[in-house]
């Protein structure tokens, strides 16, 4: 009998179906959802409609699931609630540790107390405090909200006027999963270098690095993630300094069981933690890891949720990449979207439209993740081969 696993919310099919496809041959999946599932029906054994923001209601519903062995989510807006449900049932999940990942200010405090390398950071309550802290750190600086995902609201500012504009922008943001949300703001030292992310499984305190992505950022001064590359044979996953930083980070946060997505800047003076998320990576990063190395991040997440050590077996050494596409102009109505190639590159993998007919999309800053109209993935023998295929996809994209 496959173990029974509870998954709380799933997200868009285009970004999450591959995870259920990996998990369900090995686990019976029950879902908690707010509306009846659609495409998920082909993968799950059952579901319960429940308010996924209501911890008590979910605990009560979960107690009715006989033989439940694990609880997980990959939805950033529900990671703390999921940990609360798991803890109430005596299953792996620590709400306090998860909250320290969810709130970037708590992350900074915990890492600072443990002496983990990171940018200097201060929480500010007003524009005057933000200006004073930026002056102390020295421009340019980073402004960011404490608890949004996918670089939403993260802005590089060069001077006081730009900071005032960015502060006003951050304080116009909303949170789709929490209508009462109000931004809390950090001013941080700008650290430079190559930015990477590491998805790790954590089982009883042992860290299992699964895949490492090299991030591509665009639309300055907004730090928008526009693509990633993952190498099946990644030398940084064997680097003692980086592995030591991951161990120290998880120890400082008290994170002993679950999945994390850790963002790191490789600076001239060594790697520094940018942030830690208590969930697997978005942006198709786990898919890129699977295609490039054979390591299944989704299956590893299910294993540690059920208190089992993950299997990390690399059976290939390819390169996989993803790129996200935006319209050129604000308030662009998308009626038709396609990719039209004269000759499709051999490395071309997925070509996925994200804009339904009639939807209106904008590039950053007005549109961040929700402004994307399509994405493409490529898998090949080298980064250059993947980049060439993604360039071809960009040229082939048509919309009107």
Image: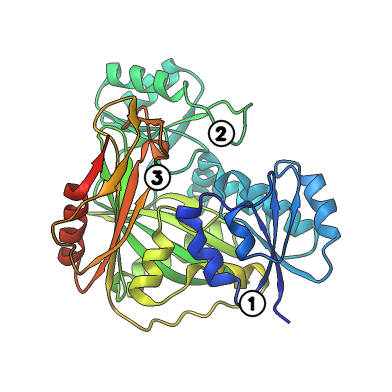
Residue 176 higher or lower than 25, as above or below: above
Residue pointed to by mark 3: 354
Asked if 113 appears above or below 24 in the picture, the reply is: above
Instruction: Tell me the residue at 25%/46% (across/down).
Output: 192
Which residue has dot 2 on it? Answer: 176
Are the residues tagged 3 and 2 within 8 Å (C-beta)? no
Residue placed at 21% from the left, 74% from the top? 381
In the picture of the structure, the residue carrying the numbered disc 1 is 308
Give the Cα separation between the discs numbered 3 and 1: 35 Å
Q: Between disc 3 and disc 2, whose residue precedes?
A: 2
At mark 2, the secondary structure is loop
Q: Nearer the viewer, residue 360 or 34?
A: 360
x and y percent of residue 19 in the render? 52, 64
Q: Residue at image x 62%, y 33%? A: 178
The quarter holding residue 47 reads bottom right
Q: Alpha-carbon neighbours of circle 2 within 10 Å: few (<14), some, or many (≥20)?
A: few
């Amino acid at each position: 009998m496959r173990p029974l696993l509870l998954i709380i919310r799933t997200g868009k099919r285009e970004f999450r179906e591959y995870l259920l496809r990996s998990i369900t041959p090995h686990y019976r999946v029950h879902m908690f959802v707010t509306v009846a599932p659609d495409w998920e029906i082909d993968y799950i054994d059952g579901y319960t409609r429940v308010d996924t923001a209501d911890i008590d209601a979910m605990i009560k519903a979960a107690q009715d699931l006989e033989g439940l062995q694990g609880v997980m989510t990959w939805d950033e807006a529900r990671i703390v609630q999921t940990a609360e449900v798991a803890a109430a049932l005596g299953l792996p999940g620590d709400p306090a540790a998860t909250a320290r990942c969810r709130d970037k200010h708590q992350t900074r405090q915990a890492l600072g107390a443990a002496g983990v390398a990171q940018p200097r950071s201060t929480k500010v309550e007003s524009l005057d405090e933000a200006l004073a802290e930026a002056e102390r750190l020295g421009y340019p600086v980073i402004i960011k909200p404490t608890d949004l995902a996918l670089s939403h609201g993260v802005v590089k500012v060069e001077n006081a006027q730009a900071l005032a504009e960015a502060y006003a922008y951050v304080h116009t943001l909303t949170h789709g999963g929490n209508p009462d949300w109000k931004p809390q703001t950090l001013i941080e030292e700008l650290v430079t270098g190559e930015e990477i992310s590491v998805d790790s499984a954590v089982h009883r305190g042992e860290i299992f690095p699964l895949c490492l992505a090299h991030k591509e950022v665009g639309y300055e001064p907004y730090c928008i993630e526009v693509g990633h590359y993952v190498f099946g044979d990644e030398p940084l996953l064997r680097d003692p300094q980086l592995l030591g930083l991951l161990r120290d980070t998880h120890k400082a946060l008290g994170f002993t069981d679950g999945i994390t997505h850790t963002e790191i800047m490789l600076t001239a003076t060594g790697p520094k933690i940018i942030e830690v998320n208590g969930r697997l990576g978005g942006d198709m990063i786990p898919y890129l890891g699977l295609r490039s190395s054979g390591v299944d991040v989704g299956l590893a997440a299910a294993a540690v949720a059920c208190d089992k050590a993950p299997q990390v077996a690399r059976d290939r050494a390819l390169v996989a990449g993803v790129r996200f596409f935006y319209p050129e102009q604000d308030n662009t109505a998308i009626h038709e979207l396609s990719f039209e190639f004269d000759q499709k590159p051999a490395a071309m993998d997925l070509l996925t439209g994200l804009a339904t007919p009639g939807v209106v999309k904008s590039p950053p800053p007005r549109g961040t993740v929700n402004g994307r109209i399509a994405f493409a993935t490529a898998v090949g023998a080298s980064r250059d081969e993947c980049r060439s295929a993604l360039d071809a996809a960009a040229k082939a994209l048509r919309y009107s």
